[in-house]
Amino acid sequence: MEKPLLSIRQLTVDFKADSGDFRAVDGLSFDIPKGKTVALVGESGSGKSVTAQAILQILPKKAHLSGGSIVFNDPAGTAPLDIAEIGAESDAMHALRGGRIAMIFQEPMTSLSPLHTIGDQIGEALVIHARVGRAEAGKRTMEVLARVGFPDPRRALRTYPFELSGGLRQRAMIAMALITRPALLIADEPTTALDVTTQAQILDLIKELQAETGMSVLLITHDLGVVANVADEVVVMYRGRVMEAGSREDIFRNPQHPYLQALMRAVPRFDMGEDERLRPIREVKSATLARVHAPERPEPKGPILKAEGLTKCFTLRSGWFSGKTRTIHAVNDVNLTLPAGRTLGLVGESGCGKTTVSKMIMRAMQPDAGQVIFDDGTGPRNVFELDGDALTAYRRSVQFIFQDPFSSLNPRMTVYEILTEPLRIHNIGTPDQRYERVKQLLDMVGLDQRSLRRYPHSFSGGQRQRLGIARALALEPRVLLCDEPVSALDVSVQAQVLNLLKDLQSALGLSYIFVSHNLAVVDYIADTIAVMCRGYIVEEAPKTSLFRNPVHPYTQALLAAVPDPDIDHPLDFDKLRTDRFSHPSEWPEPFRLVEGEAGLMKEIEPGHRVRLGSHRALEAA
Amino acid sequence: MIRFLLRRLVTMCVTLLIISALVFFIIKLPPGDFLTNQIAELRAQGESASIAKAEFLIQQYGLDEPAWQQYLVWIGVMPGPNGFSGLLQGDWGWSFEFDRPVAEVVGDALWLTLLVNLAVVIFIHVVSIPIAIYSATRQYSVGDYIATFIGYIGLATPSFLLALILLYYMNRWFGVSIGGLYDAQYAGEPWTWDKTKSLLSHLIVPTLVIGLSGTAAMIRRMRANLLDELGKQYYVTAKAKGLPPGKALLKYPFRMSLNPFIADIGNLLPHLISGSVLVSLVLSLPTVGPILLGALKSQDQFLAGFILMFVAVLTVIGMMVSDLLLALLDPRIRLGGSR
């Protein structure tokens, strides 16, 4: 049998921390065969990234490799080399790093230096390893940029990372890793920060390049959908140990280890039953949630919240020194209806205007046209005309849950201060009553009451997101705006938070607007789904009919790009390559919108509406 | 680009105009002026000849006119007794205290001040940047602690005290007099090679004394900035590319951590001039600091006004330079704006 490209045996990595030593990787062993993709799967903290850093010897200062071997059989080199034996800053390691083993990272924005051009950063890798001149490096950089799909590689050489979209930045990272033709590519969550459609393209690109160059890929991810689509072999890690390893077939058809089975149950799928619940790996228990009731208050007769004809334009200055400006329509004639006690899902790629819509609903931003109607049971009123006490009451009724649980909590405030702040601002209750309320809130979200005196940094991502939810609930709101609340979380934690949101909704009678780019998540939690693209709502329907019968080409493309954790439903990369439909002018008739045209929404079945080009809609009428 | 420059130039002029008005009226705020005070003194002594001269000067410089008229004449947009002759025309006015034109009084001092301060700025950067890089890359090592400790001492030592101590011991141990910027024999002499050599050797101690606290502060800030940048993902990327640590450090995190310092250039120049007054007094450096102090005390309005305007011009130009440098070095500023 051919020797594997990389074989890791009994790898152990220890961290020195203030709270004592801690073993991040504990006796890990696995092989990466030549030309194959091995997926390393696990939750955050399972030691996947540390393993990758150990292979490249770029471990953080506090970590050190305390045992085991990492044998690299370079097909181009001579003798097998044990990476664990050589020094991190030795010449051999410098030559290996970036030359024979390259790595791409999760966040393409922060992984590239904002001060250097793409061409400089990519060409640098070649200059270090191949000893080529500047002109030659420029030429090769252009070739590799063209290969990874840059539309204008000559121009791309001189562009800076911040001028590119997330997808192009990740392509630039891939170009940087591949310009030296490495034998092994380590991809650490390469698509987690990207939209589904972009994710599908990047995965496709990695697969293609692998077929071309015959390199091996170590794919680190927590997304089982991605694994099912691109991996040949799968290694499941938990707390630094291998739980289960095997071929993709074995892992998905016949998962043995309870941890792996639990991980698979935690992923939301499209074919879930109406009342089927996700089962997180660790269930969060709340003693009081089952007993709490919605506060007694008048209920609205119609929808609780309505957006009518919301429109917002932004004016961009195209540079510091030029006076040129450009207007973009971030939100175009958006109409939304949120019935009381239900969930409205808002789906779309980044930059489609979902966050702008939620900000306008919060009245954190003034629309150019349109109104938001809120009905608290006393009759519908336009939110933008509220002032004084009525506005304060509206602020109480509508609360926000943020995407990033790390930056949305003030690190200098204790949990108690964070949770009582809304009460203090609105002058509710005596200190004793507030204390009782905070204890109740903590229990509702399944956190221990002893955590009141702790600071946010001592909580995990999922716990912090639950703190964010508790803070939003403090004022007994009627509507919660959730802006990508689970996209920064692991699958298992994601399942916890989604279940919590569902339970809170049924217990407290809350209405949600749930903004996300993950269709499976929206499918799990929402009742009605609106799909947004370039500021337009292109399709809106109850979730069953949207997923059963997606009509708009953009919705179809979005659905087709979601990787399913089921190896019988692989992504159709060929179709994804050709049809993206992310711009109105690419849509086929009758959906095409010409410049400056808004089109019309047409109802095709009860509650299911699709945007058509306006002349088509007129013809139909 | 050109539009931007023009816009900046116009705002600079407006800023300077406002500053000049403020400077002038604040100097004028206390009752009386240098000459009326002097006349009162002379009257008491009964010296009529000097009184006549003082009264002639009052006429000459229009000190009997209302303040706003004096201001307009001073900046040179209104004809005075000698026609249009003010800052705009290059006439910096008359120093009553020294009884000489301001240009003569300030003359050499101006350029020596710039020289000393330039030396200080260079000293600060040359010394603090390597130390900062050392202590940031070896955080919590012995060397880092030593650098930090010395830095704190540097911050906590009053510079005039250090000047006094050095003055005493340099003389006692080496027999060197370090007062002044050149040996006494060269005062008033034309610039020769020997005078320049003397100047350079005298520059060492003032540079050290004035620059010490700045160096300490800079080490602390640079270290903190670098530590922030060292944790960033792009530095890991650079290392994963195979760059040796030293090269990777200089090309990426170091470059990023420079931004706040470039933005600071505008503040640095005036701060150094006003900040070094005490040291200049102690070391009897012929810089503008002590002259300014004297002029303000005796209400020598044209002299004080000119020096303050000079500092203002330096500040405004420094700001402009730092803005341009930032745009040059940081593409996000040059090309950004859309996000």
Image (spheres, coloured by chain):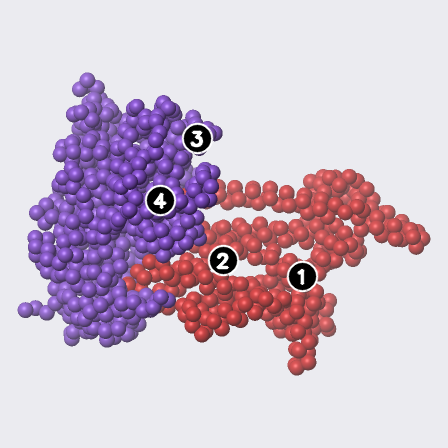
Of the two numbered discs 1 and 4 in the rendering, the one whose residue sits closer to the viewer = 4
Q: Give the amino acid at mark 4.
A: Leu
Residue B117 rendering spot, x and y as whole percentages: 60, 62
Compared to residue B141, the image places residue B172 above or below, namely: below
Q: Chain of mark 2?
A: B
Which secondary structure lies at badge 2? helix
On-image quarter of the C terminus of chain B:
top left
Give how far across and how far down residue A398 sits, in percent: 36, 35
The lab-note entry on whether marks 3 and 2 share a chain reads no
| Mark in front: 4 vs 2 | 4
**In which quarter of the view is residue A428 placed?**
top left
Q: Which residue is mark 2?
A: B261
Disc 1 versus disc 3: nearer the observer: 3
Q: Which residue is mark 1?
A: B277
What crowding class fits label 1: few (fewer than 14 Cα within 10 Å), some (14-19), or many (20 or more)? many
Amino acid type shown at disc 3:
Leu
The residue to which callout 3 is attached is A391
Q: Chain of mark 1?
A: B
Q: Mark 3 falls on what kind of element? A: helix
Secondary structure of residue under mark 4: helix
Spot the red chain and give its letter.
B
Q: Is residue A104 visible?
A: no
What's the distance in space between the residues labelled 1 and 2, CA to CA?
Answer: 23 Å
Q: Are marks 4 and 3 on the same chain?
A: yes
Residue type, numbered disc 1: Val
Distance, label 3 to label 2, CA atoms, is 44 Å
